[in-house]
Image (cartoon, rainbow, N blue to C red):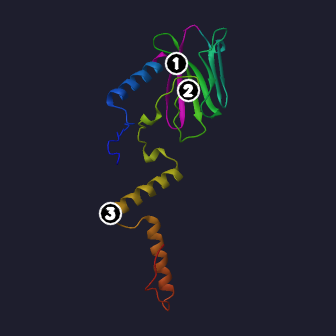
């Protein structure tokens, strides 16, 4: 006897719009509860902490290390104290104390990431995470890139346009040109079965 009455269970791994909205609201709530605000680009991370307006730099305790960050007011519990999720360039990372328009002061911390191709889910590993898959980076201008990177991106863009038009990419064009030149230099050879790999 065949078993035809099997129950098929289909699991839906994609969250519903309601679940996604709830997750974003929870994430926003967790981030708002932090005693600091933070933003990041693919290459660096900036943290701002409001402190009383009567404080000076010497009143603060700020330690920026390769994989650790300590921020606080001397004699008080630290505002941030934990391990960084990824390494930073200590020599390129800074902190400043600025007066805000409201009269309070803002401690601004700039961390320069070692890996410039990675989004951070949190500032320190003990803090709540954000969903880095939802980050929509601003599109940068080609003029913002260094020469080598710009050349690479322009080549990729050119090759993409060539493929869309059914034409050879820059590398394929180079190979074709080399074969043509070789054929001209060696007219005595038979190239009827020549293929470019």
Is 120 colored magenta in this rendering? Answer: no
Q: For residue 51, which quarter of the picture?
A: top right
SS of the residue at dot 2?
A: loop
Q: Nearer the viewer, residue 94 or 64?
A: 64
Residue shown at 59% from the left, 15% from the top: 79
| Distance CA(mark 2)–CA(mark 3) | 45 Å
* Callout 2–callout 1 Cβ contact below 8 Å: yes
Residue 62 relative to residue 12: left or right: right
- For residue 165, the mark is 3
52 in magenta: yes
> Residue 173 placed where, x, y %?
44, 70
Q: Does residue 67 sit above or below 37 in this rendering? A: below
Residue position marked by numbered label 1 in the rendering: 36
Under circle 3, the secondary element is loop
Residue 194 place in picture, x, y as percent:
46, 81
Q: Which residues are magenta?
A: 32-54
Question: Which residue is label 2 attached to?
Answer: 123
Residue at the spot x=61%, y=27% of the render?
94
Crowding at mark 2 (Cα within 10 Å: few <14, some 14-19, many 20+): many
Q: Earlier in the sequence, mark 2 or mark 1?
A: 1
């Amino acid at each position: 006897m065949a078993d035809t009455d099997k129950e098929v269970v289909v699991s839906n791994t994609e969250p519903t719009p309601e679940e996604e909205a709830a997750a974003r609201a929870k994430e926003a709530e967790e981030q708002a509860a932090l005693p600091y605000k933070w933003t990041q680009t693919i290459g660096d991370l900036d943290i701002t902490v409001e402190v009383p307006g009567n404080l000076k730099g010497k009143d603060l305790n700020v330690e920026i290390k390769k994989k650790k960050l300590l921020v606080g007011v001397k004699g008080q519990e630290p505002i941030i104290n934990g391990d960084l999720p990824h390494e930073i360039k200590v020599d390129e990372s800074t902190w400043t104390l600025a007066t805000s328009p409201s009269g309070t002061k803002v401690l601004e911390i700039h961390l320069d990431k070692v890996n410039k191709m990675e989004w951070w889910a949190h500032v320190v590993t003990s803090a709540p995470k954000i969903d880095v898959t939802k980050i929509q980076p601003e599109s940068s201008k080609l003029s913002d890139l260094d020469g080598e990177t710009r050349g690479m991106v322009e080549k990729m863009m050119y090759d993409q346009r060539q493929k869309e038009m059914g034409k050879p990419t820059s590398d394929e064009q180079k190979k074709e040109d080399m074969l043509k030149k070789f054929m001209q230099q060696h007219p005595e050879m038979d190239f009827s079965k020549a293929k470019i790999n």
